[in-house]
Amino acid sequence: MSDHAELVSHLRAAWLSGRTRPLEYRTAQLEALGLFLEEKKQDILEATALDMRKPSFEVELSEISVCRSELNHTLNNLAAWMKDENVDKNWATQLDSAFIHKDPYGVVLIIGPWNYPINLLLVPLIGAIAAGNCVVLKPSEISRNMERLVAEALPSYLDKDCFAVVTAGVEETTRLLENKFDYIFFTGSPSVGRIVMTAAAKHLTPVTLELGGKNPCYVSDTCNVQNVARRVAWGRFFNAGQTCVAPDYILCSVEMRERLVPALREAITEFYGPEPRDSPDFARIVGDKQFNRVQALLSSGRVAIGGETDEKERYIAPTVLVDVQEDDPVMREEIFGPVLPILTVTSEEDAITFINARERPLTLYVFSSSTKVVRRLLERTSSGGFCANDTIMHMTLTSLPFGGIGLSGMGRYHGRFTFETFSHLRSALLRADGREALNSLRYPPYAPRRLPMLRTTVESRRRTAACTLL
Amino acid sequence: KTRPLEYRVAQLEALGRFLEEKKQDILEATALDMGKPSFEAYFTEILLCKNELNDTLNNLSHWMKDEHVDKNLVTQLDSAFIRKDPYGVVLIIAPWNYPIHLFLVPLIGAIAAGNCVVIKPSEISKNTEKLVAEMLTCYLDSDCFAVVTAGVEETTRLLENKFDYIFFTGSPSVGRIIMTAAAKHLTPVTLELGGKNPCYVSDTCDVQNVARRVVWGRFFNAGQTCIAPDYVLCSVEMQEKLMPALREAITEYFGSNPRESPDFARIVGDKQFKRVRALLSSGRVAIGGQTDEKERYIAPTVLADVQPSDPAMQEEIFGPILPIVVVANMDEAIDFINARPRPLAIYAFSCDSKVVNQVLERTSSGGFCGNDTLMHVTLTSLPFGGIGNSGLGKYHGKFTFDTFSHHRGCLHRNMGLEAINSPRYPPYTQQKLGLMTAAFEIKRKGMCTLL
């Protein structure tokens, strides 16, 4: 524990020195991060392959390319984001300078999960550095090879006085959290999210929690079944289902299910061949504990596609379950594995009621050729994010905020939103030290007759109905 | 029910009528609670609230609109936007010092964002609490908005419920309790807390103007203001110059016997009175120092030669006492400030804008005001909030609406056009990877100019 305390105060001293503030410094650190991604690409591919047999295509796309995009987007815009933002003034402050100044928080802690161990650690890091903070990174101990790579290789690219990697299991993380951080960014499960927020509360530390839940996927009767099947299968089985924004379960009519199951079978075969275990493009479950957990969910409903497992390889076949009931095991927790249950509903209304009776998910998916159906689902539900007629793709736009609501999390990031997450927006008003006459209106002895004048200097008036200026 | 614009506008307009029709009751209740002068009450409880109301009503339909965002190559033909969703049922807990303003302004944003609201006014400002509990709900839709009166124990039980957002204004110690309770339900929070707001006065300044602005900010509402200048940092020479100017300003505002001035408030309760009075034994009383327990009166007081270890420097004063702590120069002042918890506001007075900018750049605080006190919070365009011990989150103007809104990232893609998607599907190939990165990846903008 004393190690961590020393580390944190060392970082805090560096931050107080102002070293991380200049644009040039931040740019240099970000460019160094880019170098890390370049030079260590092979090591990253190997480590993720060892950890969960992640296909290198998936790593290149969802880990390396995504980080490079965020890096470039940030480097392209950082100078603009850092600028003071001038704001509207009232009459009293017309001749003053009023603006929002972007300050770093100080020493921030980023805790990453194991499923996308580069993406979910580095994308927050990019914003934290861009905003001028010092950072403690805690990669997941479950993706062991990646943890080792990050701990050994990353620090040599960054300024060691301002950035550090801490490796820790559950107990040491608890002790790490006893330190005072100025911001904590956590990605992981809701139950650990509660623990992190409770620890943060002791120091009044603001937090962003990217958690999870069961992402519903409503498939209406009017859609292109082949396209739906491919897009859903892709989203569900990418990284063997270990994705926080994967479609977790399907809601559709009985008729749609009859058409969807063969289409899903076709898509799975197209993607992974007749024997997915032999496909180099299908990942494995990250550890024995997680494997056992997901395997236990297979006893829900009836296996329509897949269902095979191999404990030694931690392989679970791309699986579709039908005749699943609400209270089956597979419906009681986030699946986080390559298992897709289909539940039937009698109507769109039924689907909406089902969704709203449950915890608000990270993402809601809707498939329909009808814009009206899509709009109805969007307007009558609440979720972190929303994607119609595809899965996962909403996460690829750096211009969309990514975050949860309710049990799926709080706060948001990606693109500019990461920079803002790690910045304190400090209001600043710089007044001239003369012009005292104007201020006299507000001083005692109070005179009610001065009120109307005072009101005029600070007020916002209600704009009445539009009148055209001729 | 709370979703349509018309509904929200109707509720907000009803709030406006509450302020209009109950104006006299508000002035009377706050006068009873802490001797708040009606000019002050009108300014902070009515006028500033009306500003927020008008700003919101003027802009609400615009704020509610979906915001379309930039798209990449792959999503060019899609619809990508940010939708503003309400959180649901939110809880607003207000303090006693500006008992209408500090629940009404958050309430405006909460309603504007489409939420249902539970309001918990402070039990310490008893008369205002009664007014709000009895009168507010007649103006608002009682299916969606409620007022709960509760002391410490019942508030603890209230917090056991799951709310979708909690907005709390009060002390850091209670803020911790709120956030811990919120953590059980993973409820997001905004905490508007407090601290000791330093006020640095450099050697180059117009002493008279500084004195008047600082005295106004410190003694408004008898010092019971979260953003009041808490203590002054200046050189020993400036302390000499400042003292007579402060005395002059106090006399100009409150007369030779402030107890008789109708424009000076009282401490809200006995417990608070005793706490503040105990701080008087710090340094040396240079101006004021008189107290009257029956009236809960503490005179506008300035303490000189205060040491960092004195009682007045150990806690937020929240009373009409202004300690002066001597520092050698600006660097020492900045170090002094940075060695302490980050405050809600930092004030810097100097004719030299470089000095003001140095203090701004080298410190960290919720907000900052150069050459005046309190005024930065009257602009609805500036975010108001703390950092570190002084709070988390921000509000006022559009920031309140944003605080109580969930910004939902939405992408609406085409059901067809499957060819665009094919490169992402297995079986994976190098060629597909090349296509994907070309389509998705954001490139670094180079330094070359296109001729």
Image: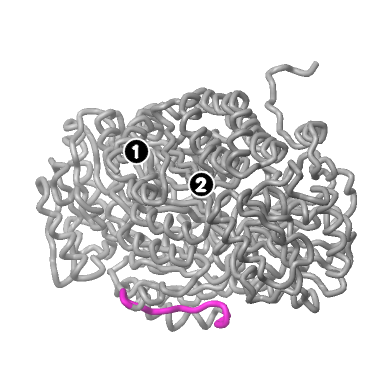
Amino acid type, label 1: Val
How are the residues colored? one colour
Using the image, tell me which numbered label, if any, was put on residue A8.
1
Residue at figure coordinates x 63%, y 76% from the top left: A327
The location of residue B20, given as percent across then percent down, is 51, 73
Reply above or below: B429 against A181. above
Q: Looking at this view, is B323 or A306 the one in front?
A: A306
Q: Looking at this view, is B180 or A251 the one in front?
A: A251
- State which chain disc 2 sits on: A
Name which quarter of the figure residue B290 lies in. bottom left
Using the image, tell me which numbered label, if any, was put on residue A142.
2
Q: Looking at this view, is A233 or A208 the one in front?
A: A233
The location of residue B49, given as percent across then percent down, is 49, 63
- The segment highlighted magenta reads B141-153
The answer to which of marks 1 and 2 sits earlier in the sequence is 1
Name which quarter of the figure residue A365 lies in. bottom right
Tag 1 secondary structure:
helix
Tag 2 secondary structure:
loop
Reply above or below: B119 against B439. below
